[in-house]
Image (cartoon, grey):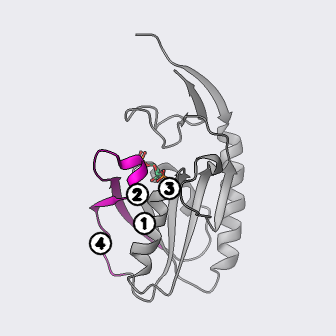
Amino acid sequence: MAKEALEVLLSAEQINEKIKELAAEITKDYHDKNPLLIGVLKGAVVFLSDLIREIDVPLEVDFMAVSSYGADTASSGIVRIQKDLDQSIKDKDVLIVEDIVDTGLTLNYLFENLGSRYPKSIKVVTLLDKPDRRKVKFEADYCGFKIPDRFVIGYGLDFNENYRNLKDICILNA
Ligand code: PRP
């Protein structure tokens, strides 16, 4: 099988720099709060683990796993919860952590679903945003990089579950 060609879109250095900026903003906005950061498995794990170590406020972490539901999932917008939170988010300042917003369907669903559980506040931080792919209007509160509509892997993002361990974010030219 031919090896796919990888082209670096965002280097580890660029990602690290951006994470420091995002964390500084989040630290400022949450300086008097004790936020609960919710990582969306699996792609966000690498981003979340680097991000939390740069945020200088007391915080908690939990995880959710979701997947699109049914055959025509890409357009249905129906999302199934595979793993729910371990705790109630009532009266908590929730910050959802995602690796990428693509169509916006996942975050649109999560925002509604978690929003109905009476959090004190709910915001979203995403490392990547592909605005050209949007099917529903969704804007993250904190966004690292807006990127073109190319298939990207690395730094948590996969192709058939591979490449999540790359330090850079790369375009996959299959
Ligand atoms: C990716 C990503 C988001 C979602 C964004 O997850 O982590 O959760 O897709 O896409 P959307 O804006 O079109 O809804 P994926 O389903 O690839 O699962 P993974 O995180 O386990 O890789």
Of circles 3 and 2, which is in front?
A: 2
Q: Label 1 CB, ligand 1: below 8 Å?
A: yes
Quarter-of-image position of residue 89: bottom left
Of circles 2 and 4, which is in front?
A: 2
Which residue in the protein does label 4 denote? Answer: 86
Height in image: 1 above or below 44? above
Q: Position of residue 127 (x, y in %)?
A: 60, 53
Which residue in the protein does label 1 denote? Answer: 109
80 part of magenta stretch: yes
Residue at 51% from the left image edge and 20% from the top image edge: 174
Of circles 4 and 1, which is in front?
A: 1
Q: Position of residue 39 (x, y in %)?
A: 44, 61
Q: Amino acid at mark 3?
A: Ser
Residues tagged 4 and 1 counted as in contact (Cβ below 8 A): no
Which residue in the protein does label 2 denote? Answer: 77
Answer few, some or many: residues within 10 Å of disc 2's Cα (few below 14, many 20 plus, some between 14 and 19): some
Disc 1 on helix, strand or loop? helix
**4 or 3: tag closer to the N-terminus:** 3
Residue at 44% from the left image edge and 58% from the top image edge: 106
Q: Amino acid at mark 4?
A: Asp
Q: CA distance from mark 2 to mark 1?
A: 8 Å
**1 or 3: tag closer to the N-terminus:** 3
Residues tagged 3 and 2 counted as in contact (Cβ below 8 A): no
Q: Which residues are magenta?
A: 60-88
**4 or 1: tag closer to the N-terminus:** 4
